[in-house]
Amino acid sequence: METETRPAGFRNPWLHLAISVACVAIYELLLKRGASETAHLNSSWSWTGLTGLASIYVWIAIVFVIISLITWLYVLRYLPLSIAFPLAQSVHIFVPLGSWLVLGENIVTLRWIGIALVSLGLAIVAKPVARIEEEL
């Protein structure tokens, strides 16, 4: 596979990776808000979760899903999957933190430890990625 020269500025794939991760975190929070908002709706289809489509939050989340997909495809054009995918897992930090800050959900001590371990794992992955990036 031939790699193209990576662009800079707004077209920087690292920026698009950050945008993709942010969009995933945002759409997860919006989906939760929309699902909670429509939980009271009772229909024969409520078991599917489709009643969530009655919420504007879910429709906005769908826009963020599309943006995330587009930016992720752009990232994969320039960065190896073996580098991009582990870093994209930072969403496992941002979603719980967002659910705590935005949705007011409780995070128990064990979960905080898990978030810290994921952060440590990302730091371990990121250090060699910085060296690889210099070579790419």
Image (cartoon, grey):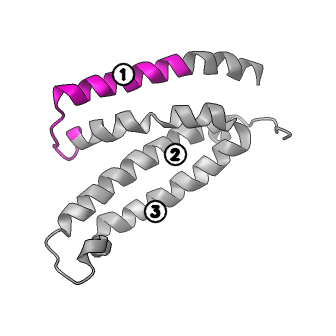
In the structure shown, which secondary structural element does the residue marked by tag 2 occupy?
Answer: helix
Q: Quadrant of residue 85?
A: top right
* Mark 2 or 1: the one toward you: 1
Residue 117, disc = 1
Residue at position x 81%, y 35% from top? 5
Crowding near pointer 1: few (<14 within 10 Å), some, many (20+)? few
Q: Amino acid at mark 1?
A: Leu
Q: Amino acid at mark 2?
A: Ser
Give the CA separation, mark 2 to mark 1.
22 Å
Q: Mark 3 sits on what residue?
A: 63
Counting residues from the N terminus, which is met first, the one under dot 2 or under dot 1?
A: 2
Q: Position of residue 21 (x, y in %)?
A: 47, 42
Give the CA separation, mark 3 to mark 2.
12 Å
Classify 48 as above or below 121: below
Is 114 magenta? The answer is yes
Q: Quadrant of residue 55?
A: bottom left
Residue 6, disc = none
Counting residues from the N terminus, which is met first, the one under dot 3 or under dot 2?
A: 2
Q: Position of residue 23 (x, y in %)?
A: 45, 49
Q: Mark 2 sits on what residue?
A: 20
Q: Amino acid at mark 3?
A: Val
Magenta residue span:
100-125
Crowding near pointer 2: few (<14 within 10 Å), some, many (20+)? many
Tell me, yes or no, whether the two marked residues, 2 and 1, touch with CB atoms within 8 Å: no
Is 57 magenta? The answer is no
Quadrant the N terminus occupies: top right
Residue at position x 18%, y 34% from top? 107
Q: Nearer the viewer, residue 43 or 69?
A: 43
Q: Position of residue 110 (x, y in %)?
A: 21, 26
